[in-house]
Image: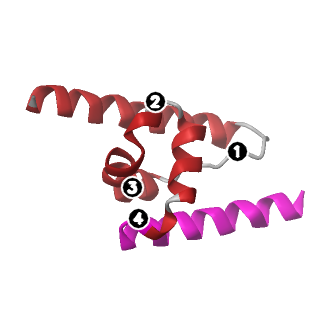
Amino acid sequence: MTAMFFNTVRKVSLVLAMTTSFAAASSTASFAYSSEAQQMCTGDAFRLCSSEIPNIPKITACMIKRRAELSAGCRTVMDRDLAAQKGKLAAQ
């Protein structure tokens, strides 16, 4: 059971890292995850949105929808990253 959990955590971390790399290189309006967001929100993603894993856009939508249930650290990082993303979109 523990090995399976850590394997899943590893897969989600890899998906988040790949998504971050893709989002940074892309000019689309997708949400770019910071490494801090990955660190602070992985537990919340498993706790609140595990049914959406590994679909990153669905995980993001789920976490935004369930914002009130996020841990304080994850909520702070997501709010900051979303605000930064909105600023970039407004500048385009």
- The amino acid at mark 2 is Pro
Q: Position of residue 78 (x, y in %)?
A: 53, 63
Is disc 1 surrounded by few (<14), some (14 to 19) or many (20+) residues within 10 Å?
Answer: some
Q: Secondary structure at mark 1?
A: loop
Judge left or right: residue 20 versus residue 45: right
- The amino acid at mark 3 is Cys
Residue for badge 1: 30
Residue for badge 4: 70
Residue for badge 3: 41
Is disc 4 surrounded by few (<14), some (14 to 19) or many (20+) residues within 10 Å?
Answer: many
Judge left or right: residue 9 versus residue 13: left
- The amino acid at mark 1 is Ser
Q: Are marks 3 and 4 in contact (CB under 8 Å)?
A: yes
Per the picture, the main secondary structure of the magenta-coloured stretch is helix
Magenta residue span: 69-92
Q: CA distance from mark 3 to mark 2?
A: 14 Å
User: Which residue is located at x 42 percent, y 58 percent?
Assistant: 36
The image shows residue 19, relative to residue 66, as above or below, that is above
Query: Which badge, 4 or 2, is on the more N-terminal residue?
Result: 2
Residue for badge 2: 54
Query: Which badge, 3 or 4, is on the more N-terminal residue?
Result: 3
Q: Secondary structure at mark 3?
A: helix
Q: CA distance from mark 3 to mark 4?
A: 8 Å
